[in-house]
Image (spheres, coloured by chain):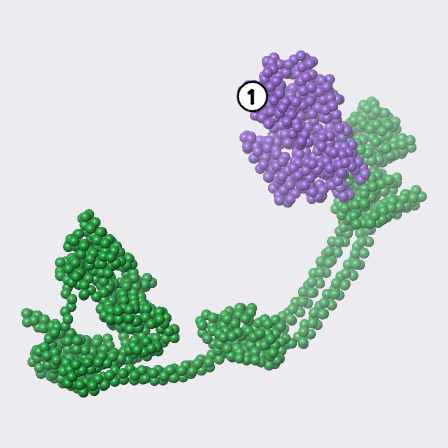
Amino acid sequence: MKNKIKILIPCLAILFAVAMGISIIVGYFNFIAEKMESDSRSHLIEVYEQVDHSFLSFIDMNWGLLDSCNDYLDLAVRNEDSAADAEQDISAFVARKKAFWGFSGFYFLDEERNFVTPEGERGQLNLSSGWDDVIARREPIMAGDQLAGQNITVFAVPAEHGTFRGFPYSAIAISYTNSDIATALNANAFAGSAKCFILNRKGEVLLSTQVGEGAYVNFLTYLKNSLLQSAGVREEERERIYNEILANFSAMLDDLEKGRTPQTGYLQAPLGVDKQKHCIIYMPVGYEDYFLLSSVPQSAVSEGFLSAQRATLRVMLIIFALVAVAAIACLVFWIVRQLHKNKTELKYRELMFDVLSGTVDDIFIMIDENTQKVDYLSPNVERLLGIKNEEVQNDLRAMAKCAVEYDIVVPKEELEEIPLGGNKHWECEYMHQATGERRWYRVTIYHMNIRDLQKYIIVMSDRTVEQQMNQKLQEALDAAKSANEAKSNFLSNMSHDIRTPMNAIVGFSVLLERSADDPEKVREYTHKIMASSHHLLSLINDVLDMSKIESGKTSLNVSLFDLPDLLEELSIILMPQAKAKEQEFTIHTQGTPPESLMGDRLRLNQILLNLLSNAIKYTPVGGKIEFTVCELQDSAPQFAKLRFIVKDNGIGMSEEFQQEIFKPFSREKNSVINSIQGTGLGMAITKNLVDLMGGIITLVSAPGKGSTFTVELSFALPEENSRQEEWYRQKIARMLVADDEEEICLNIREMMRDTGVDVSYTTSGATALDLAIRAHKHNSDFDVILLDWKMPGMDGVQTARLIREKVGAHIPILVLTSYDWSEIEDEARAAGINAFMPKPFFATTFFQTIKPLFSGAEKPEAPAPAEEGVLNGRRFLVAEDNELNAEILTEMLDIEGARCEVAVNGKIALEMFEKSEPGYYDLILMDVQMPVMNGYEATKAIRNSSHPSAKSIPIIAMTANTFAEDVKSAFDAGMDGHLAKPINMDAVRSTLARFLKKNAQDFEEDDRK
Amino acid sequence: MKKGNLVIVATALFLNAALCACGGKAIDPNALTIMGKASDLQKTYMTRIFDLYRETTGEKLNIIAIEDSAYETTALEKFSKGEYPDIFLHFNNADLQRFDVAANCYYLDGETWVDDLTDGAYQYCLDAEGRLLGLPFWESSVSGCYYNKTLLDEMSLRASTTQEDFDGLCAALKEVGKNAICWPGNGCSWMYQFGLDPVFADDPDLLEKLNSNQTTYAQIPAVKDMMQWIYDAENKGWFGNNSLEVGWDQIGEQLSSGRSVMTFIWDTWFYTDFKPGKYTVDDFALMPVFLNTAPEGTYEGGNLNMMMVYKNSEKRQKALDFLAFCAEPENYNVAFDGISTVNCFKGQTTNIQSKMVTDARDSIDRHERVSTAATKIIGYSADDIALLVNDLFREKLTIAELVTRMDEDRKRIAKGEGVAGF
């Protein structure tokens, strides 16, 4: 209020000063206007009095001139001897006068107004007015006339009767053109805007005093017409003005007639179409009854005044403006200073508040009660909520999109419920629009009165830290509960899962003991004990594996591996399982996945085996499992990104379980699954391995509709070798493929693209036969023929048989099958089939398969089963601290005809080996974890010993540690192989046989050397 | 007027065919051959004189009437083949130069009838060296400033004798609410030649220089003066407030109603196109045209068709005798009996001359100029100038630009016609 008064007082003072200034100026101008108008009128009258004076002088001058001419005429006639001389003399005289005085003509006139000029021209003048005065009364006259189209003014005086060029004259006259007179009178006042005439009492123009005014005959008539044109001026007014002029004229004439001095007339009237106000002045010229009448536009008369007025006004305005500007400047300066002071304070506060609110995570908003518009918004909104300040500034409702659950924008009704000075608060969650970060705020709305304005101030206090802490605490609590629950579940599961096989083992062991005499029962119970043992083992393996992965101790062993080999191995492992459940198990490739890859083959195998085993496990009998491998195109040049898809039409899984499947010990609870054995760790291990390999695993599943697992992994590619060259070297340029699935044919062609081999294909055996025959007839046999085994109509074997009949035996024919071909092998070979190719087709596999056929080498034999009796008579050094395990192994090897000598720790084993004769022990089976000296140390010591067989004797690790690192450690220590505990006799037999055979060969070679 | 022209042209075409057909059948090697435009040869006074000649002398005439539109080219073609007529009809305009006048024309300065020619007619028929080219045997009119004398009297104003007075008159008329001048800016274009005539008629060298591209309009101050005056007059309201909308058809109404007081036109227009209204033809009088190019104004003399004699004609004397026959007062008074025209011969008494012209005879005799601009300036296009002036009124052009454009238009036409120097 105080500030308002401070501003109001100077403003009022300035307004008062301005009003006073204007009043003074107006008063001054009114005074000046009256004064100037009076002066203008005087000036106007003075100007035309001068014209009048000039006119009278002009007339007098002409009378004088004519008198002098008369005198000269008399003189010339008297002086000259002859008339001709006199006329010549007169002509010269007139010419001189004409040149000096500027008249346009000189006339000798007779009584009939006929004339002759000194040059001899003849004619007649009109001289209608006053001619009688010249002739009868012998008085001079001045009259207007027109001669040769020119308006002239004639001055005529009587002369002594005489003759000129034979023309009898009684008067002489001179004439002026109007422009000459105008020049002489010099009445061109007021910048040519004035009209000035010499009129007679009728208003007839006797002469114009200005150039270009020859148009007017009777100026009073013209004036009347001009008045008539003044539209907007009442007729009575026009009549009044005209009558006033006439009356004044009459009055002047009366004055003249009565010897009184006539008064000069002056009036103002609007004339012409533009109604411009004219000053009309008229005065007798002192000759005859002639009047001078002038009409001057008021603006021209007042021009001087107006220009003075304008100049004065300009000066005053400038002074006034300067004073006003100075006053305003002072005021403005003062106001600006005050405002600046206030503004600075405000700015400081704002700045501080902005800095404060920019620093803190609280949001402040002020809205107007009436308009609901945002008056203030702290600048941290965009940082905290990811929404632009301007957006919120324009419309508070913009914040609604950040609110997770409900809107911050409080309905007007609710706001109105908040009493003045009261507040309302609640908590809500917001999400950052850009980052998705969530924040918790305690929103408090204060209803306040600020300078008589009702405002709502919204304070959003950040409670995120507290909320997060609470949330973490809750999560920790939940996690603890969950962990506890998981541990309980785990223990419960483990307890159940371990107890189940253990129960079987214990139970059947008891039964075995009791039925020791019944070989049938013994075999049965032993078999069941073994099954339970295997299950228990796998359970323990998974638990350990998982434990290791979770503890971050798992690492990848990257090496070059062959994808087709891996797939073939998977096929070999899984095909029998699928076959056992009468499931259709197919392996497909899409595109051209590279065959050689750099990666951890073991882990990949583990991942795929897990997925495929599960697929087979959870797909009912007769179901379908598809395994597809395809290469993705978005990988880097040195890498191959592969997608492995395991799709089954099994029991599928619920949406909820899909969220849990990759967590440890998760198994869906339903009757089907409960009947299937499992640890609940397989998928967790798989997921962890995929993560470890930098891949992703996804799942699409629905209960009763099956599941599809997709794994995407990237593998480095080995350096590429020229493949075409190899095919060319083998002279394989054309091949024929027959498969009822065209996609497979196209796939084969695509995979063979880089080899340079031209692939023709057909989807039927009959067509394949036809193509082979035709090619043969044209001496362009295919170099190799690949036939699908199971084709509708003519199958692969039949087709091969007919091809051999029609074409001959020189073309290698291979059968492509995803089935176990052992059952048809004999029939196929009899039909002329040279070899078998497993599906999916890989060029490398194909090449390796057919290479021997082209090089003449025989087909490599299938690996022989482990030799029976290979262990017979062998002697092994067994380092095993566990007496039971040592006994089991000893007994088992004893069954195979081998003899074992047991060392209870590594040190003893070392000593026993060192003491032994070379060749005494065929092989050492080394436990790893042993007291005194473990297996690694013992192995290293053996290898480093001076025993002749120290370097060559095969040492096989025998440990429950089955991880890759364990295997690697074994090799690093100098061991040659690895056998996992518990001992699988087949594995033991096979492994030992391999090393024994190898060792024997080495010995032979050594002997040869 | 325009409809009238159509009738004349149609009649001319018919007569042309008829005359040609007659000529084709009746060519007499001993008879004089007269070549002219079909429409010219069928004029009443022409056919009258031909008939009178035949009747009086018993001689025959071979009349070669050429279709109007092809007159120049056909005549030139005949000349180029040596087919010269004994008497050749042509206006004394720029086109005449194409017929190599100096080589083919017999100059008539020594003929006995020369003194009987009015000054205007005589002047018109002279070439650049002042030699008489032909006998003007044609109807004619006087172009000037026709004004409503009655109205001026009512206003107590008088006609002007100088440019300054004329300006004063226009201003006075404007002040009393009258359109001083009816200026038909919509499609009419003859006014400009009135102003230009004195500039070129008074200085034949200037015309020659312009026609040989040694000077330009832009270099002639009078041209700019005229355009400036026209522009000022329009801006001062002397042409009224709708000059660009007033065309040929509105001139009569403007004058007969008294809305406009003056216009620049010719006397015969009052007998062909003017329809009386509040004012009749008797209310009008004639004064010179003032376009700021002649201090005391100017009148444009008529365009006259001349009878020219072929210099090398075997029947040249006979042709001269024919011209002398035509120039006999008793013969031309028969031929022009009742024809509305100003006099070509001083002794013309039977033709009808308007009172306006006779009243202004003295002024006409002093200020009449031979029609020059429209007829003798090569490339002169009144229509082009009119369009440019309209743009000037619309403030699309300045005076300087207008004059430049006038030059450009003129040069373009001259160049198109292959005139030397362009």
On screen, residue A235 above or below A632: above
Front one among B324 and A185: B324
- Residue beneath the point at 18% across and 82% down: A521
Front one among A868 and A645: A868
Q: Amino acid at mark 1?
A: Lys
- Residue beneath the point at 67% across and 32% down: B2
Neighbourhood count class around disc 1 (C-alpha, 10 Å): few under 14, some 14–19, many 20 upward: few
Rendering coords of residue B347 (x, y %): 74, 21
Front one among A606 and A102: A606
Rendering coords of residue A844 (x, y %): 22, 61
SS at badge 1: helix
Quadrant of the image occupied by residue A906: bottom left
Q: Quadrant where the C terminus of chain A lies?
A: bottom left
Q: Which residue is mark 1?
A: B78
The colour applied to the residues of chain B in this rendering is purple
Quadrant of the image occupied by residue A592: bottom left
On the question of residue B315 being in view, the answer is: no
- Residue beneath the point at 62% across and 43% down: B397
Please give left or right for residue A305 compared with residue B398 in the image: right
The colour applied to the residues of chain A in this rendering is green
Please give left or right for residue A771 compared with residue A696 in the image: left
On screen, residue B378 above or below A29: above
Please give left or right for residue A54 compared with residue B391 in the image: right
Rendering coords of residue B159 (x, y %): 77, 36
Q: Quadrant where the N terminus of chain A lies?
A: bottom right
On screen, residue A614 above or below B48: below
On screen, residue A761 above or below A283: below
